[in-house]
Image (spheres, rainbow, N blue to C red):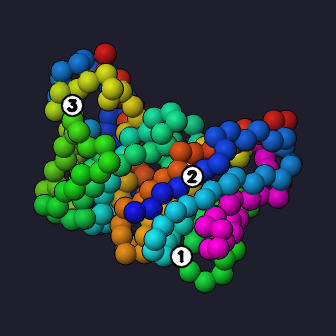
């Protein structure tokens, strides 16, 4: 079965370090998304991509970057981790416009 | 742009009672509407979706939702809840021309025995 996997599931890092969260999907979807989930804010869009070499900023993109070198992967990089970036991060992918998102199981990131 | 408001952050109900989780949206264009469920320590799963056609949409686990265009609402209902329905529920909207999904803040459904 097709799936979307995130790694690691849990990560603890120190302020100022660079961190990369991995996302890999086998749906062959063109569209991929990164969200963060925080209490009281629901899910907020960080970055998204509509295809290889395409990346776009979401509503909370400051301090984050992504790159899309193939269809399957959209890694999320925190250039210099801050305590405000402690959160649960979800990757998702989708096909056509009317298609729902398929989510990974999330990465819980703690920045100390 | 689209926005979503889930009117209740928490909803406690007794087992076997009916439940309604409320969702209102705002959009200047036609939309697709979704409800997702998130169980503890898991990602989000699709419960149901409205794309077009019948305004009453049936989903998994006995849930259904009704699209009301005049009231810009998409409330989620279940006639009889079970302990296993304890989870967080998210309403989401997407413009029919766009690819970005906008989520509400979520409603935590707690089922008491």
- Vertical comparison of A75 with B113: above or below: below
Q: Nearer the viewer, residue B28 or A41?
A: B28
Q: Residue at x 32, y 48 (%)?
A: A59
User: In the image, is residue B106 above or below residue B101?
Assistant: above
Q: Alpha-carbon distance for marks 3 and 1?
A: 38 Å
Q: Nearer the viewer, mark 2 or mark 1?
A: 2
Q: Is residue A80 above or below residue B7?
A: above
Quarter of the image for the N terminus of chain A: give it.
bottom left
Q: Which residue is mark 2?
A: B5
Q: Is residue A21 magenta?
A: no
Are callouts 3 and 2 both on one chain?
no
Where residue B9 sits, quadrant-wise, is top right
Q: Nearer the viewer, residue B3 or A10?
A: B3
Q: Are marks 2 and 1 on the same chain?
A: yes
Image quadrant where residue A36 sits? top left
Reading the image, the residue beneath label 3 is A19
Chain letter of disc 1 in the image: B
């Amino acid at each position: 079965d097709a799936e979307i996997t995130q790694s690691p599931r849990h990560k603890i890092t120190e302020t100022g370090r660079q961190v990369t969260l991995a996302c890999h999907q086998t749906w062959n979807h063109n569209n991929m998304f990164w969200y963060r989930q925080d209490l009281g804010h629901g899910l907020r869009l960080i970055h998204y991509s509509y295809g290889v070499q395409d990346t776009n900023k979401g509503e909370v993109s400051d301090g984050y970057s992504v790159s899309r070198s193939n269809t399957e992967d959209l890694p999320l990089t925190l250039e210099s981790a801050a305590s405000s970036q402690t959160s649960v991060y979800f990757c998702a992918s989708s096909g056509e416009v009317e298609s729902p998102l398929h989510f990974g199981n999330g990465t819980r990131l703690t920045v100390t | 742009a689209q926005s979503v408001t889930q009117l209740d952050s928490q909803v406690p109900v007794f087992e076997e009672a009916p439940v309604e989780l409320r969702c209102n949206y705002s959009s200047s264009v036609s939309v697709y509407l979704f409800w997702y469920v998130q169980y503890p320590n898991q990602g989000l799963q699709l419960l149901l979706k409205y794309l077009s056609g019948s305004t009453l949409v049936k989903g998994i686990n006995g849930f259904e939702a009704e699209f009301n265009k005049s009231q810009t609402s998409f409330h989620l209902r279940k006639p009889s809840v079970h302990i296993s329905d304890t989870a967080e529920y998210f309403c989401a909207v997407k413009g029919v021309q766009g690819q970005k999904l906008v989520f509400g803040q979520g409603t935590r459904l707690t089922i008491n025995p």
